[in-house]
Image (tube, grey):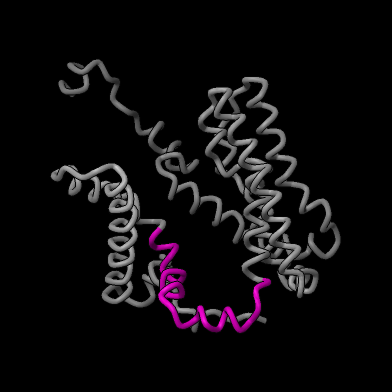
């Protein structure tokens, strides 16, 4: 108690701690899990809505993102709406509705490259404008219309590449990284901080240190995920997502 009083910092209450935990604001990983849980629980409802009101389902996220950007322009601080699934719904629905999208984009790889290039330009211009206005959060967030469109274009392009190319990639390390990606996301901040501490012991040029941080964080996170996937009980590491084994997934 004396430590809090001497520093002039109020001691956090149980109520504020519970609220932060409930809305996932204690860490980026927490709010990701919160949003994902909401979407999983809503999956049966979303399938029904897609069969009858597909257009309106796809409009939910763009409408929310537009509202968020307009509020930012007006200088209105919105609450933590990013912890609620409507802000991310379109990405999840895109996967649920993938059979329909696959038929639409089949054989359109060249067009998708052009679409991605256009969206990238729009996103970069918007990000630069936000940066000039002094709103660094809006300049870097994924929750913008331009960013969402770019991500969807990337997903569509990757899924539309020829099967022969995918087959060649399936025998590379990229598959293992993809399987471990969720676990890497969960633990990479911890590994990143350890890497910063380690590299701080040495005098390294900026360009080299930047690459070293990226490489060591990725390698360390993947190694940690692999170790957990190997030694934790199978049921636990499948549930947590530390190392996904696709043999346990069934697609209709």
**Residue 9 on the magenta span:** no
In x, y percent, where is residue 60? Answer: 74, 47
**Which of these two is toward me, 227 or 172?**
172
Which residue appears at 33% of the width and 73% of the height?
229
Q: For the C terminus, which image quadrant?
A: bottom right
Task: Look at the image and give the residue range highlighted in magenta.
Answer: 160-184
Q: In the shown orientation, is residue 220 left or right of residue 71?
A: left
Based on the displayed image, in which of its 4 quarters is residue 14 positioned? top left
In x, y percent, where is residue 105? Answer: 76, 69
The overriding secondary structure of the stretch rendered in magenta is: helix
**Which of these two is toward me, 185 or 197?**
197
Which residue appears at 32% of the width and 58% of the height?
215
Q: In the shown orientation, is residue 232 left or right of residue 15?
A: left
**Residue 170 on the magenta span:** yes
**Which of these two is toward me, 52 or 58?**
58
Which residue appears at 55% of the width and 40% of the height?
141
In x, y percent, where is residue 25? Answer: 45, 39
């Amino acid at each position: 108690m004396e430590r809090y009083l001497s520093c002039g910092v109020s001691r956090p209450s149980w109520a504020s701690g519970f609220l932060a935990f409930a809305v996932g604001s204690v860490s980026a990983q927490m709010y990701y899990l919160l949003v994902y849980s909401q979407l999983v629980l809503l999956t049966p409802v979303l399938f029904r809505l897609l069969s009858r009101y597909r257009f309106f389902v796809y409009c939910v996220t763009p409408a929310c993102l537009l509202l968020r950007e307009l509020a930012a322009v007006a200088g209105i601080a919105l609450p933590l709406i990013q912890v609620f699934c409507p802000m991310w719904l379109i990405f999840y629905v895109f996967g649920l509705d993938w059979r329909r999208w696959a038929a639409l984009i089949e054989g359109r790889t060249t067009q998708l490259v052009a679409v991605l290039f256009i969206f990238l330009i729009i996103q970069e211009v918007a990000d630069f404008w936000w940066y000039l206005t002094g709103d660094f959060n809006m300049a870097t967030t994924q929750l913008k219309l331009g960013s969402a469109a770019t991500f969807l274009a990337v997903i569509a392009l990757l899924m539309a590449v020829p099967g022969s190319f995918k087959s060649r990639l399936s025998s590379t390390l990229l598959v293992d990284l993809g399987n471990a990606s969720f676990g890497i996301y969960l633990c990479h901040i911890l590994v990143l901080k350890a890497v910063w501490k380690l590299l701080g012991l040495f005098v390294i040029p900026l360009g080299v240190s930047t690459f070293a941080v990226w490489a060591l964080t990725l390698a360390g996170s993947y190694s940690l995920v692999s170790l957990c996937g190997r030694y934790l009980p199978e049921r636990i590491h499948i549930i947590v997502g530390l190392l996904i084994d696709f043999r346990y997934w069934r697609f209709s």
